[in-house]
Image (spheres, grey):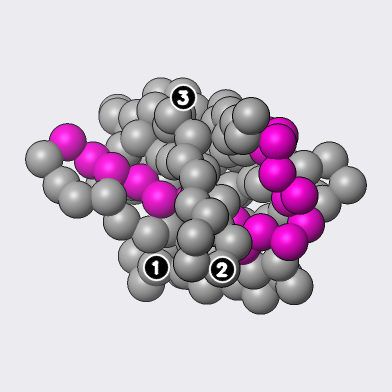
Amino acid sequence: QVQLVESGGDLVQPGGSLRLSCAASGIPFQIYNMAWYRQAPGKQRELVASITRTGSTTYADSVKGRFTISRDNAKNTLSLQMNSLKFEDAAVYYCNAKYEFFKNYWGRGTQVGVSS
């Protein structure tokens, strides 16, 4: 059974930091391309950052320079370090695992709030 379990979401002030984690099980983690998505109320789910199985990363323009995605293949864990958080970063953050075009898994999400 495939499981992606996110953690680390919290309520922070603008300018604060959070570190999200995603624990993966039931998949050969090291061969999957991984990503973080987010969805704010009333908006579509959007890609925040991705990391390939070889470690190449991409970021949405809105988070470049503030967020860092990383993976630990030995621990089957995906992380997202979020710094300088803004009001517009508030959303539910989802972990995603993809392999080729036929394997695509989602976690249940973790809530990030930004409020003064």
Percent position (x, y) of residue 72? 80, 50
- In-front residue for pair 107/115: 107
Q: Between disc 2 and disc 3, whose residue precedes?
A: 3
Judged from the image, the secondary structure of the residue bearing numbered disc 1 is loop
Magenta region, residue range: 23-41
Residue 24: in magenta span: yes
The residue that mark 1 highlights is 60
Task: Tell me which residue sits at (65%, 46%) in the image.
Answer: 79
Residue type pointed to by label 1: Ala
Judged from the image, the secondary structure of the residue bearing numbered disc 2 is loop
Residue 15 has which mark?
A: none
Percent position (x, y) of residue 10? 46, 24
Could you tell me how far apart the alpha carbons at marks 1 and 3 are, in whole angstroms? 21 Å
Q: Between disc 1 and disc 2, whose residue precedes?
A: 1
82 over 34 or under it: above or below? above
102 over 21 or under it: above or below? below
- Quarter of the image with the N terminus is top right
Residue type pointed to by label 3: Asp
- In-front residue for pair 34/68: 34
Residue 10 has which mark?
A: 3
